[in-house]
Image: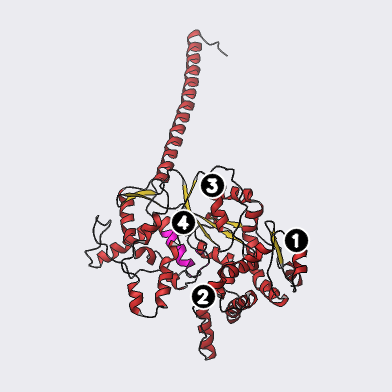
Amino acid sequence: MESMTGDGACRLFLMRKQRRCCGILSVWLVLAFSCIYFTVTQLNAHERAAHPALPPGCQLLMKAAMTRRSGASKSAEWPPREGAKRVPFSGISTGAEAGGSVHVAPGFGPGSLSSLLASDDLFAELCAAVAARPAVHSCFALRDAVRCMPTFLVIGVTKAGTTAFFRYIKQHPSIAVSTVKEPAYFGAKYEEEEAAASARSAHAAANRDRNVPSRLGTYLSAFPTCDRCERGEATPSYAWRDFAAAAAAAAYQLLGPAIRLVMLVREPISRAKSHFEYFRTKRFRSSANFSEALALSLTEFESCAQSLGGWDYQCTYRPGRARVAAAAASVEGRHAVRPRRSAMEYELIQPALYVEHMRTWSVHFDPRSLLVLDAAALINDPDTVLASFESHMGIPRFRYTRINKHALPPSARETQGQSADAIRQSSGFEAQVELTGGYAKRHDLPRLLEERACAFLQPFKVRLLKQTGITWTSCSRVARRA
């Protein structure tokens, strides 16, 4: 091999040096571009969080306006001019407000706008305001005022610890709750229509809507205008009342898919007993006692399932049960016996169909956006439960002040501090006892009625366990016999 000359060695050295410099420069360039890309990505993410897209309901409103305009309606325009009269969208409604099925989701198509939003002029103004100037942290300027929308909803259920939960989370510095615990906004339209349907005269029903302020304006004014906080409210009827499907649709169309949902659940028979005691003088005057009311409630749900040859989702809410009863009566050639509007015994069972209510809300929301919490765990171990909520909301941990006072029904207060054996001995009949949060409660149920209730609720309990990991020891004796 020929020896390398001095010039050749020098050139080789320079080439290697240049190659090394180019390699180092390439690495630095890659790192620089990576940093720039990461920074831009984070800024875009922050920009998207600070300036979210239009609520889904606004997009539906815009589409409806364009459709009407293309149909020779020149008065409809988007976005509407400030002070301009909005074209009413009275023909747009949510079919589920009449008890639509989750399977086919009638009225939930891309062209359906919730009647709650369509009937409120302020919603069109809200859409125009957000379109002109994107909202910042879910707040926007509307009618010379700053209005903020909630970022989470506690949707249920009644008599399952929502008041205690509300008192806990309002302690957190990153949480700003509504001025009233239960604004009940998403069920207002349905309840008004139901009241109008049962009014004694059409004149009284027509006058009910006169000079009524915007529900949306009242609702939004209930939330603080804090910066970088999570705002929310707790209306436990959203999850289980007959308007649950309509409430879910309206919540999605107004608040969007990023909203966080929370639902507290409780052992069903214990919840039913507490519900009966709390509303006894208002809703259950026709029932002599809890056992009679629970038996009537079970009959309503069992009859629906029997008519269909087994349980079906359409038996969850009253409109669906009424349709099943009418269809069964038609097949048998008889008139359907519709329950009285004043008959409220169904409220003892309907709220406890937790998995069905979760199914209702999952039509519009990602199941991961719903956090299900056990009311008994909130009393026994609030720190763990509240930590789950903090993780769900993405807020820092906080040390809460323990709440020792809970809204217990009279039966619970009377037996507070007593042991289960003491209650059994003091009662003149078989009592099912649940120990929760340091107190004992008796359900005062005859054995056969208890077994009947447990047999009906057992399939829902199994499904809830599979979906959430939450279960209760009640009805274990009935389950072992089965």
Task: Point out the stretch of residues depicted in magenta.
Answer: 234-253
Nearest to the eye among marks 3 and 1: give it.
1
- Identify residue type, mark 1: Ser
Residue 104 horizontal/vertical position (percent): 48, 70
Nearest to the eye among marks 1 and 2: give it.
1
| Cα distance in 3D space between marks 2 and 4 | 28 Å
Labels 2 and 4: the sequence-earlier one:
4
Judged from the image, the secondary structure of the residue bearing numbered disc 1 is loop
Residue 462 horizontal/vertical position (percent): 66, 65
Residue 341 horizontal/vertical position (percent): 49, 78
Q: Which mark is residue 419?
A: 1
| Cα distance in 3D space between marks 4 and 1 | 37 Å
Q: How many marks?
A: 4
Residue 78 shown left or right of residue 415 in the figure: left
- Which residue is outermost to the top? 6
Which residue, given by chain and number where applicable, does mark 3 sit on? 171
Vertical position of residue 93 compared to residue 46: above or below: below
Labels 4 and 3: the sequence-earlier one:
3
